[in-house]
Image: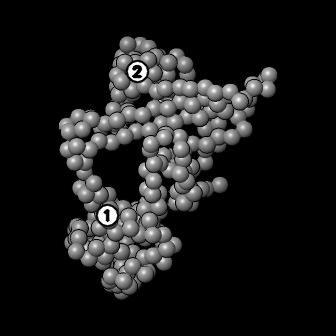
Amino acid sequence: MEIRPGKLMKEAAEVDMFPGFPVQGYPNRDSTIYIEKYGLQDVKTMLRGTLRYKNYADVVYGMLNLGLLDGNPRDGLVIGKEQSWASIINVLLGTKQLRDDDLRIIVKDKIGSNNVAYQGLKDLGLLSDDIKVTLKATPIETLSDYLAKELVFNHHERDLVLLRHKIRVEWPDGKKETRDISLVQYGEAEDGYSAMAKTVSVPAAIAARMMLDGDIGAKGCVVPLTKEIYAPMLKLLAMEGIRSTSTSTFE
């Protein structure tokens, strides 16, 4: 059964996994396909999801409903032409160049009268008649190019990567255990590496080094699900400052 990403994002809800971080979570497509891959055939519930700052999903879902995430060329949007965001939205909605209150009414109707989404779109300049962009091949390419320039970090800002595993275990003696494994990785401000860059590139570099040293002998596309691969990788990641913390509680 196909599950539309937009539908899952609509189910985003606030989570309290990381006190002090106002985040929300939503499912990543069909999580059950990972039960066999992880060797968890006896598991009763399996959920893989995404964590984002609060209100993120509302704004992106609004973009989806307006057609801004469309990966196909659209009639009326000519590559290389300079056009305002308000004009682009009108083309995507099939309206006749509405402005101000008229555009606000139709946009709110399209995104379900979601004030958070509307305010987010407005704050990003995506409803402005003054901000003009050069059109790319598709709406999502135009949006991506614009946001890549608009949302650049200031010198004092840095990114953040959060990872959380919550595992509930029912032992044969009837005891119930909850294991929480968390990772909080900050990027470096100014000219340092971002958290995303570090958490993606460092594991890849470690894996490459392990292959060169003969620690990984398997050939082809290998998923690091065996202890012989992931145990030394986790140890080496900790030496690079990328480490998780674990807690365990019993009911």
Report x, y in % for residue 132: 22, 71
Residue 198 seen by the camera: yes
Q: Check the image and report above or below for 89 versus 196.
A: below
Image height of 149 relative to 116, above or below: above
Is the residue 248 above or below the residue 12 in the image? above
Nearer to us in this view, 39 or 110: 110
Name the quadrant containing residue 55. bottom left
Q: Residue at x 31, y 64 (%)?
A: 124
Return the residue nearer the eye: 202 or 114. 114
Instruction: Locate the C terminus by quadrant.
Output: top right
Identify the amino acid type marked 1.
Leu
What residue appears at the point 50 percent right and 32 percent down from the top-left corner? 182
Q: Picture coordinates of residue 125 (x, y %)?
A: 29, 67
Q: How is the image coloured?
A: one colour
**Residue pointed to by mark 2:** 238
Residue hosting label 1: 124
As drawn, the label of residue 200 is none
Tell me where residue 8 appears, x and y as whole percent: 56, 56
Residue furthest right as drawn: 173
Marked residue nearer the N-terminal end (2 or 1): 1
Local packing at callout 1 (Cα closer than 10 Å; few below 14, some 14-19, many 20+) is: some
Nearer the observer, 11 or 7: 11
Residue 213 or 167: which is nearer the viewer? 167
Q: Is residue 21 left or right of residue 14?
A: left
156 in relation to 224, above or below? below
Q: Residue at x 38, y 68 (%)?
A: 119
Residue 196 quadrant: top left
State the SS at label 2: helix
Badge 1 element: loop
Residue at figure coordinates x 44%, y 42% from the top left: 20
Q: Amino acid at mark 2?
A: Ala
